[in-house]
Structure formats: C-alpha cells, structure tokens
Amino acid sequence: MKRRKFLRKSSTVAAGIMSAPLLASYTEKTTSKETNSIGITPIAICTWDFGNATAKAWEVLKVGGSSLDAVHQGVMVEENDLNNSTVGNGGRPDRDGNVTLDACIMDKDGNCGAVLAMQNIANPISVARKVMEETPHVMLAGKGAEQFAYEQGFEKTDLLTEESKEAWLKWKETSQYKPIINIENHDTIGMLAIDKKGDISGACTTSGMAYKMAGRVGDSPIIGAGLFVDNEIGGATATGVGEEVVRTVGSFLIVELMRQGKSPQEACEEGVKRIIAKNKDKQDFQIGFIAINKKGETGGYCIHPGFTYRTYTKDGHINNPSDSYLKS
Ligand code: SD4
C-alpha cells in the first residue's frame, strides 16, 4: 500500500502536517560472516525505513562494537537529521511552540536511562545514556534533565527549525487537537541490536506527537512501554500512538511473550492484538512493534498497512514491509 493511502487510514491524537520524507529505500549485501558465541551474526533492526541509522549501527557491530554503542550511534543519526521532523533536532514542537524530546536506552544488564520532555538538547539519547551511566536514577524529566545535560557538557541548541516553526504557525491557524487522519507524526525510531558477543541492547528516541499538550509524554521514553530488553530473551520497541502502548506496557509484554516461547513475530502480533482488544470500537490509529530474540530471529507487526522496519544482518540491509492486523 502506498504511504499516502496509509496516511488516510491512520490517525493520531494530535493534529500535524507533513514530516520529512522517509529515507530512500535501499538494500545492499553485507560481508560480515563472523558469528558470536551463540552462533549468530550481529543484527540491527529499527522502526521505519531509517536505513542510515541501521547502516551506522552495523558499522559499529561489524568491527566488534557493543550493541549498546550500535543502538546509541544508530538512533543519533536520526536525532541529527534536520529533515526528520519526528526525532531530535528539527522535531515538531508542542502546541506552544516548544520542542520537547523523549528518549530511553537499555543495555544487556538491564540498566536503563531515560529523559522525558527535555528541551534545548539535540541528542536526548546521549543524555539518557548519561542518566543510565552517571546517576543512580533511571529517568530525568523536563528542566532537571536539561540541567543535568548542561552539567554533562551538552550544549544548548535551538531545536525549532524554520520549517518546523512555519508548520506550527500554520497549525495554529486552526489549532485542531483531536484525532484526525495523520500518520506523519509517527516516525519515532526504536532500535534493537545484537553484537558479536550475542548481547542485546535497545534505544528509542522521539519528539513525540506533533502539537501535543505541553508536558505530554508518550511511550517512547518509558521502559517497558516504548522499549524493553532482557538479554536472556530478546528485546522489543514501539512506534505509534504512545498512549495505547503505555496502556498495555507493550514492549515488556512482547518480551514476556517471547519468554513464554513465542517467536518475535508471534509476540508482536499478540502485542498488537492486545491493543486492539482494548479498543474494540476504535482502530483508527497506528501502532507498530518490532522485536528480536536471542536466536537472532526478528519480527514486526502493526495495526494498519504501511509500517516498515529496517534490518541489517549478514544477509543484507533490508526495508521489511510489516504485516498488519487490518489488511487495507
Ligand atoms: C509517542 N510513540 O510520543 C511516540 C510517537 C511515535 O512515531 O511513535 N512516533 O507517542
């Protein structure tokens, strides 16, 4: 299905306008054949067609870098891309014109860090990692997160680009904040990776829903909702209307389903069905899950057709169309 049709069929809780086009699709054969201790080669997988991000992660993995560094550096590519208006610098602002960013990261030992609704810092994933590594805490929000970032040496950056500002001013003409058909707010990057040692890590970063209420936080920086990793089992991450993912603790659920024996694909399908079951009369929003298990199997599933996810493995760099609960 064409993306445009997908847009018409999906809606979010916030109004918005066109985001940057997705990165060009490409596939290339990879050469790394080295396997890790559990007999699989490294893998990077991310939501949507963020091929530059998975390519960066693969660069780290193929030379023996850790899955933590791979997901960190991979998602940073999107945070730094000013044309990506749903992640990092250049992200769409809230209804008051402030860009507030959410991110989290989780490593092989179950350590995690997150920043919520943080302003003026271009790489929230790096701050999330600092929260994980340099503080006794898991989450820092708002002004506290920003203050911590400055203390760690991050620079103050104006994240509202001219293009985002113009789009916001246009939105203000009507200021409609209700479910309308608009998938362009949905391009959060969640990434999972396995390294040569067989260890799994994950990262997730977003500017959240465009023109959201000030202070609104979705699933993306919430460990268990937008991202979860258990190195014994696997990992999962989400994109879409965060409120629905939080209500079912979606990524944790998927990892637990894999623990019970489901494949990543089956677990993602069950995760989506759980959300559908909570919204029997309302399916006009999009959710996409991706997952990976310890054997290196991957899966992805969504509500509406149109979601894709990137995988970079020894077999190539592929943009995978996700199967969907609704077929058209
Ligand atoms: C949120 N889940 O803030 C995010 C939005 C998203 O792709 O996924 N965009 O609810």
Image (spheres, rainbow, N blue to C red):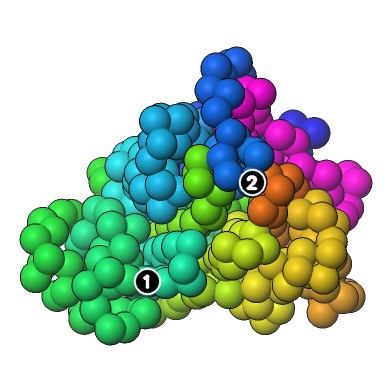
- Residue 113, disc: 1
Q: Which residue is drawn at 58% across and 23% down?
A: 33
Q: Looking at the picture, how far across and down is residue 307, in whole percent?
A: 70, 44
- Measure the C-alpha gap from mark 2 to mark 1: 27 Å
Q: What amino acid is labelled 2 in the image?
A: Ile
Q: In this picture, is 81 found above or below 268?
A: above
Other-residue count near label 1 (Cα within 10 Å), few / some / many at <14 / 14–19 / ≥20: many
Give the SS element for disc 2. loop
- Looking at the rendered image, the disc whose residue lies closer to the viewer, 2 or 1, is 2
Q: In which quarter of the image is ligand 1?
A: bottom right
In magenta stretch: residue 326: yes
Q: Residue at x 50, y 66 (%)?
A: 220
Give the SS element for disc 1. strand
Q: Residue at x 16, y 74 (%)?
A: 148
| Closer to us: 163 or 117 | 117
Quadrant in the rendering for residue 309: top right
Q: Looking at the picture, how far across and down is residue 276, in whole percent?
A: 84, 70
Please provide the residue range marked out in magenta: 300-328
**As drawn, is 192 to the left or to the right of 56?**
right
Quadrant in the rendering for residue 242: bottom right
Mark closest to the chain's N terminus, 2 or 1: 2
Q: What amino acid is labelled 1 in the image?
A: Gly
Residue 104 shows in the view: yes
Q: Residue at x 45, y 62 (%)?
A: 107
What residue would you read off at disc 2?
Answer: 38
Q: Looking at the picture, how far across and down is residue 316, in whole percent?
A: 62, 23
Q: In this picture, is 181 found above or below 20?
A: below
In magenta stretch: residue 202: no
| Closer to us: 316 or 102 | 316
